[in-house]
Image (tube, helix red, strand yellow):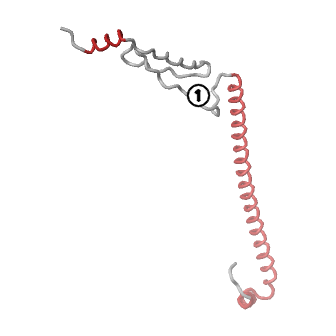
Amino acid sequence: MFDIGFSELLLVGLVALIVLGPERLPGAVRTAGLWIGRIKRSFNAIKQQVEQEIGADEIRRQLHNEQILQLEREMNAMKQELISAGKLADPNAPAPEQPAPVAQPNSEAPAPAAPVTSAQTVLPLEPPAPATPATPATANQATNQDKPQP
C-alpha cells in the first residue's frame, strides 16, 4: 500500500529507539498499535455501512421494479377482462376489411362508404341482368337519338 520495505522499517525503528530511548519505546509502540487498530476498525465500520447502503438501495430498486411489474400484470388482466366482455376492441384481432365503394348510377357524386364494423354484415352484390338482343325498333330509336333533330 505505501510500498515500505524491510530496510525502511528497520531505519524507522532505529530512529525511534534513538529518539525515544529503550524505556519509552515499548509504550510508544503499544500506543501506535492501539491507534492503528482503532483506525482500521473505523474504516471497516464505514466500509460495512457503505455496503449496507448500497445493498439497501439495490433492494429498494428491486422492490420498485417488482411493483411496476405487478402493476403491468394487473393492467393486462383488466385489459383482457374488458376484451372478453366486449367493451374494448381486441388489439391482436385482424382489422376488418372494408369493401370498395360502389358507384350509384343516379347520383352525381358517389356517397362515401361507411366503415364496416364487426356487428355489420356485408351483403354480396347481385350479378347484372343478362343483356337482351336489340330489336330493330330500339336500334332505330338509338340512332335517332344520336342525330340532332330539327
Please give left or right for residue 53 compared with residue 145 in the image. Answer: right
Residue depicted at x 78% and y 66%: 41
Residue placed furthest toward the front? 136
The C terminus lies in which quarter of the figure? top left
Kind of residue indicated by mark 1: Pro
Residue 103 sits in which quadrant?
top left
Is 26 in front, or is 23? 26
Residue 81 position (above or below residue 147) = below
Check disc 1 and report its element: helix, strand or loop. loop
Residue 124 sits in which quadrant?
top right
* Residue 127, horizontal then vertical, whole percent: 52, 19
Please give left or right for residue 122 compared with residue 19 in the image. Answer: left
Residue depicted at x 76% and y 69%: 40
Residue depicted at x 39% and y 14%: 107
Q: Which residue does the numbered mark 1 point to in the structure image?
A: 96
Is 71 in front, or is 126? 126
* Residue 121, horizontal then vertical, whole percent: 60, 18
Q: Would you call the spot at circle 1 few (<14 residues within 10 Å), some (14-19), or many (20 or more)?
A: few
* Residue 48, horizontal then vertical, whole percent: 76, 60
Residue 4 position (above or below residue 85) = below
Residue depicted at x 69% and y 37%: 72
The N terminus lies in which quarter of the figure? bottom right
Is 84 in front, or is 124? 124
Residue placed furthest toward the left? 150
